Image (cartoon, coloured by chain):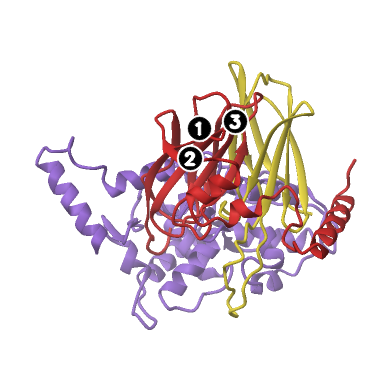
């Protein structure tokens, strides 16, 4: 409450042409703070780990992930992040990055995908999953989102994602749309992007995975969605579930043409 | 090459000796416990041989005006002065004020940047302790906000 | 064995700016976990740097330094091809050294 009042006052002062006398707005201060953190993003640590994991022979089959097909052919990792989620013929499913990593960890390395999906974030193989996701995102840094909607399944998932986005429920009767369907909204000092349309470079899907300074954790998109559902007082639909992938398609297609800044650094 | 095992074994030996001498926390002998336990800026400075602190335009503290989250606040200390022995970075209202102490040498610029945890909005200090014990500081207020939810 | 550091050293003029990211929890010893138990202090206490093997920087850190610490400093006279090594030691006696080449 205090902050919004000071922001309003500052805004008022500035429109009165007293901008040279008005203090820096809170928003400008936060922008400067964020800029100071850009150089030296701890996400780099996870990125380095992920690159190592891609090449390392692991799992019951003692194999690396170097033949994993993330949508551009076996072993291709550059540029795949900004084209996911998409339809994969070999599994007959639309999959996002973390879902596809599960497929490869199971088929190539012999891990149990269901077990990994049930593992809490930050434990066991989920730690490695996050590192891999961070590295893969880095390999698409700066590239523009370009999801395919050529396949019928992809089109269907877009519509499903859209329905899920607006579906209200839970103890607070919230939907994703409650926070993310209007321009210019914020909670305290956190801007809430309007995700029903293209919110611009580096916003929404273009900003995750991200390192969160508040808890010192690296979060992939799956964890970001998990936490949104927690805040909505909804149960989490499950790691790499169709529901989460469908949301990824809806958000990703809406972001067509936006540049990815992942892995980013965030509060 | 000193292996990790060897280092830990050596540290354990020293820790054991210090523990029996009544200093269980001095496992790492180079660590200035008094300095890092100090509650005030002046006490931390004293722990490194500094006298009464006085403000100086020749010392610069680098910090944002507002930190979106107190867990990671970029803080830097620099000076154009020569004859400096230590540069200290401190947060006045933290449970222990001292964040870091950098030895100054001819081999590096007297300009150090790190990131600190801040429990609340507070003045942050950069202190230069000279060879003769003179302690010069610069300070700046950093507001720490709590963000909302989400990204 | 702790995760490796990320070290970048860039030469410009008569010095090289070194930027380091270390992987470390930096627990203050004041935090309580979900069960209400105090999480023990676990933090880097000493950081040293060498330039082509010669010690050039040393620092003492307390638990007030952020998790996954960042450090930036400049080494005088360092040029492309030189080696910068960073070592940290924590309060449990654990240590880690990583090296980078100045670019």
Question: Which residue is at 71% across, 67% downward?
Answer: A124
Which secondary structure lies at badge 2? strand
Question: Which residue is at 67% across, 41% downward?
Answer: C6
The x, y position of residue B55, in whole percent, is: 40, 36
Which label is found at residue B78? 1
Label 3 to label 2, Cα distance in Å?
16 Å
Q: Chain of mark 3?
A: B
Side (left or right) of A202 relative to C96: left
Task: From the viewer's side, name the closer residue of A229 and B149.
Answer: B149
User: Image quadrant for the C terminus of chain A?
Assistant: bottom left
**Colour seen for chain B:** red
Q: Earlier in the sequence, mark 3 or mark 1?
A: 1
Which label is found at residue B131? 3
- Crowding at dot 1, Cα within 10 Å, few <14 / some 14-19 / many 20+, comes out as many
Check if mark 3 and mark 1 are on a common chain: yes
Disc 1 vs disc 2: Cβ atoms closer than 8 Å?
yes
- Crowding at dot 2, Cα within 10 Å, few <14 / some 14-19 / many 20+, comes out as many
The x, y position of residue B83, in whole percent, is: 58, 25
């Amino acid at each position: 409450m205090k902050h919004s009042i000071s922001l309003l006052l500052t805004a008022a002062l500035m429109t009165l042409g007293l901008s040279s006398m008005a203090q820096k707005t809170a928003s400008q201060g936060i922008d400067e703070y964020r800029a100071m953190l850009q150089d030296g993003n701890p996400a780099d640590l996870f990125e380095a780990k992920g690159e190592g994991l891609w090449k390392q022979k692991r799992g019951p089959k003692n194999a690396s992930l170097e033949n994993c097909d993330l949508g551009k052919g076996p072993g291709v990792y550059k540029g795949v992040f900004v084209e996911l989620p998409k339809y994969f013929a070999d599994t007959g499913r639309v999959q996002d990055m973390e879902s596809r990593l599960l497929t490869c960890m199971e088929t190539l390395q012999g891990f149990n995908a269901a077990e990994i999906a049930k593992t809490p974030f930050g434990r066991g193989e989920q730690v490695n999953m996050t590192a891999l996701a961070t590295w893969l995102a880095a390999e698409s840094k700066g590239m523009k989102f370009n999801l395919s909607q050529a396949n019928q399944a992809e089109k269907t998932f877009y519509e499903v994602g859209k329905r899920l986005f607006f579906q209200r429920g839970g103890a607070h009767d919230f939907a994703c749309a409650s926070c993310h369907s209007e321009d210019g909204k914020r909670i305290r000092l956190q801007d809430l992007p309007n995700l029903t349309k293209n919110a611009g470079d580096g916003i929404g899907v273009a900003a995750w995975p991200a390192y969160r300074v508040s808890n010192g954790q690296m979060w992939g998109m799956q964890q970001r969605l998990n936490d949104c559902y927690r805040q909505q007082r909804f149960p989490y639909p499950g790691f790499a579930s169709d529901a989460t992938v469908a949301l990824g398609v809806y958000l990703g297609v809406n972001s067509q043409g936006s540049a990815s800044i992942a892995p980013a650094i965030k509060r | 090459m000193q292996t990790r095992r060897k280092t830990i074994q050596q540290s354990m030996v020293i820790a054991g000796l210090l523990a029996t001498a009544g200093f269980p926390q001095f496992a790492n002998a180079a660590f200035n416990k008094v300095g890092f336990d100090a509650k005030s800026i002046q006490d931390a400075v004293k722990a490194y041989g500094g006298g009464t602190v006085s403000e100086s335009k020749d010392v610069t503290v680098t910090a944002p005006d507002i930190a979106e989250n107190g867990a990671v606040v970029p803080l830097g200390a620099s000076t154009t002065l020569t004859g400096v022995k230590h540069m200290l970075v401190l947060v006045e209202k933290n449970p222990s004020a001292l964040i870091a102490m950098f030895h100054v040498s001819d081999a590096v610029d007297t300009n150090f940047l790190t990131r600190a945890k801040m429990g609340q909005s507070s003045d942050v200090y950069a202190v230069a302790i000279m060879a003769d014990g003179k302690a010069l500081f610069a300070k700046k207020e950093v507001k720490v906000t709590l963000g909302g939810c989400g990204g | 064995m702790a995760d490796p550091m990320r070290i970048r050293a860039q030469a410009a003029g008569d010095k090289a700016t070194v930027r380091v990211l270390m992987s470390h929890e930096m627990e203050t010893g004041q935090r309580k976990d979900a069960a209400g138990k105090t999480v023990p202090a676990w933090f880097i206490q000493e950081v040293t740097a060498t330039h082509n093997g010669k010690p050039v920087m040393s620092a003492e850190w307390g638990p007030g330094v952020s998790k996954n610490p960042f450090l930036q400093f400049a080494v005088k006279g360092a040029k492309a091809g030189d080696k910068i090594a960073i070592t940290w030691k924590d309060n449990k006696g654990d240590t880690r050294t990583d090296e980078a080449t100045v670019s």
